[in-house]
Image: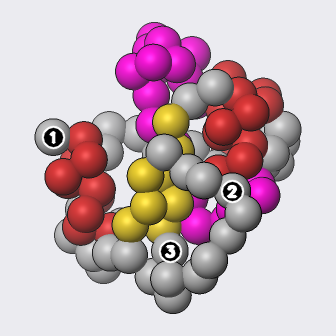
Amino acid sequence: MKSSSIDQYFNKVFTSDIIGCSKPDKRIFEYAVKSVNARKTESIFVGDDLTNDIQGAKTFGIDQVWFNPQKTSANIEPTYEIEELIQLIEIVS
């Protein structure tokens, strides 16, 4: 995020090391949403793995952004798909 100069747009970033479970376990998504006092409808998950990130967030019930710089085709349809991280600004603005 720092190398892409988008870190300034995030207040918190969560990892499985911090939370103590791995995606697609719903606890990681619950932890993130609860820790910022948000609702699912106010939340969005950004990830590059279709199964662990996108399907996990989708199953939990939050919008997803699939970071797909290789333009890989998939059978899972995310809420959003981007090829460059800077495109997140357009989605969250």
Residue span colored magenta: 32-53
Give the residue number, with chain letter if any, for mark 2: 76
> Which quadrant of the figure contains the N terminus?
bottom left
Q: Residues within 10 Å of mark 3 (few under 14, many from 20)?
A: some
Label 2 close to label 1 by CB (< 8 Å)? no
Q: Nearer the viewer, mark 3 or mark 2?
A: 2
Give the spatial CA distance, label 3 vs label 2: 13 Å
Residue at 74 percent across and 33 percent down: it is 59
Amino acid type shown at disc 2: Ile
Disc 1 element: loop
Amino acid type shown at disc 3: Asn
Residue at 76 percent across and 55 percent down: it is 52
> Which quadrant of the figure contains the C terminus?
top left
User: In terms of sequence position, does the residue under pointer 3 or pointer 1 come before the other?
Assistant: 3
Give the residue number, with chain letter if any, for mark 3: 68
Q: Nearer the viewer, mark 2 or mark 1?
A: 2
- The answer to whether residue 49 shows anywhere in this view is yes
Task: Tell me the tag on residue 93.
Answer: 1
Q: Position of residue 73 (x, y in %)?
A: 62, 77
Q: Residue furthest bottom?
A: 70
- In the rendered view, would you say 33 is above or below 39? below
Q: Is residue 50 magenta?
A: yes
